[in-house]
Amino acid sequence: EDAVLDAVCFGACLPCGSSLPTEEVTFTVLTDNIEVAADGMHIAGAMNGWSGEPMNDNGDGSWSITLSLEAATYEFKFQNGLDGWEELECGGNRSVVVELGAPVSVQGCFAQCSEVCAVDPDPADVTFQVDASEIEVSADGLFLMGSFTEPAWQFGAIAMNDDDGDGIWTATANISGAATFAYKFNNGAPVVEDVAVYDGEESGDFAAQGCGVDNGVGGFNRTHDRSGADEVLDIVCFNSCAACGDAPLEGTEVTFSVDMNNYGAAFGFVNVSGTWNEFCGDCNPMTDDDMDGVYEVTVNISGSATILYKFTNGDPTTGDNGVDFVEESGILLDEEGNELANFEADGCGLPNGFGAYNRIHERSGEPEILDAVCFNKCSTCVVSVDEIAAAQFNAYPNPFNATLTLDIVPQVNNTQLFIADLSGRVVLEQNVVAGTERVVLNTESLKAGSYIVQWLNQGVAHSSVFVKH
């Protein structure tokens, strides 16, 4: 049967100028547990685009606002002063379900999950301890930040210290106010040039681990219920609710070996750095006494059973990575810059928090000699005599400037020659005709830095590192 539909406004279900029915919702926040900011209490949520809206002072320690809202579920939070967000001890955001037919009232204590305010314990010192043995600590050190500082979080962060160098960072804060507070540790400066930095924040799921809550903005915070007496919290591992590894071990010798035959030692010496020497770039130089291309050093290490480390080709204190020295990134790239493998995927390392990887080893507490590994790889360097013979070449000078000369053992088949930067990006490619004995490359267009020269013949590769001045 023919029908005429009611006129509706474009993009809506109702005629233009009309609106859905609403219900009055009264929000009340109790402030007995806080000192109210000069600009009063506010509410922000899904009903106002999370933009703080001022509430009215009832004169009895409570603040209220009544809003006309359509039937729906709304998440919200109270604010102590505009943008002074509460951090709920139970995590996440508050919520209210609005149904038509009867007014709705919602009441809560600021930053608490109960309808009435709990009595705050006395102010007291709380000492925090975090074990950084399983991360690479920023040059700026570690920081403690939380809901208990003024201002809160990044802008009120407290610098921690590791004065005895045992990898345990500590900070003590005198905390007043609510019994339950939220906090987390930060690796590096939390504020740079007056701008909050979030890269160094702990990212662990503390709710799942049992020591924290959802923070309502896509992450998690640690929480603690203070007693009102001075407290020293247990040592926890950075990004974890538990302690790092096993109990500290006595000092024992660990021998490290790295095979540089596929890489060369173009910067003078090879070094190993790790958590035991705060990733010092020149504290544990390695030697190749028998000239076999495998560099070794024995280090006496104490403390945590878990150690993180990496090898460097040259001294990182001398200049720029890739120009004056080369540090293991733990990432293997193909000629187009695509990632082929990394230390974590290959089972010998972990991300270092700065876009690269560190090697990892669990000490036994007894003297150990670790297997020789290829520079920037988890595996050994395996090259057969036949492969070397099939791909042998000699390139000079090293360092080079405008030209690089290669003397080649003549090949039966045509050969490919590549020059790549240390990220794996090919910057020069040339086909070499079978029987050629010398190739002179024009390298004027290359920037100063380190390059890998690779000679590929019938699927067999031989490569070395060269430096352009």
Image: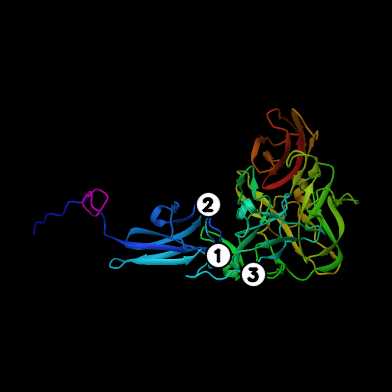
Q: CA distance from mark 1 to mark 2?
A: 16 Å
Residue type, numbered disc 1: Asn
- Judge left or right: residue 312 versus residue 71: right
Q: CA distance from mark 3 to mark 1?
A: 15 Å
Q: Residue furthest left?
A: 1
Neighbour tally class for label 2: few under 14, some 14-19, many 20 plus, Cα within 10 Å: few
Give the foreground label among 3 and 1.
1
Identify which residue, 12 or 42, lies in the foreground.
42
Q: Element type at marker 2? A: loop
Q: In the drawing, what numbered circle is on residue 33?
A: 1
Q: CA distance from mark 2 to mark 3?
A: 28 Å
Question: Do the residues bearing badges 1 and 2 touch, measured as CB atoms within 8 Å?
Answer: no
Identify which residue, 348 or 229, lies in the foreground.
229
Neighbour tally class for label 1: few under 14, some 14-19, many 20 plus, Cα within 10 Å: some
Q: Quick one: label 1 or label 2, which is nearer the N terminus?
A: 1
Q: Which residue is mark 3?
A: 226
Is residue 12 located in the magenta-colored stretch of the structure?
A: yes
Looking at the image, residue 462 lies above or below residue 380: above
Q: Quick one: label 2 or label 3, which is nearer the N terminus?
A: 2
Q: Element type at marker 3? A: loop
Q: Element type at marker 1? A: loop
Answer yes or no: is residue 111 visible. Answer: yes
Q: Which residues are magenta?
A: 9-18
Residue 249 point in image, percent of width and height: 82, 69
Residue 402 sits in quarter: top right
Q: In the drawing, what numbered circle is on residue 38?
A: 2
- Judge left or right: residue 19 versus residue 431: left
Residue 214 sits in quarter: bottom right
Looking at the image, residue 90 lies above or below residue 425: below
Residue type, numbered disc 3: Arg
- Judge left or right: residue 196 versus residue 322: left
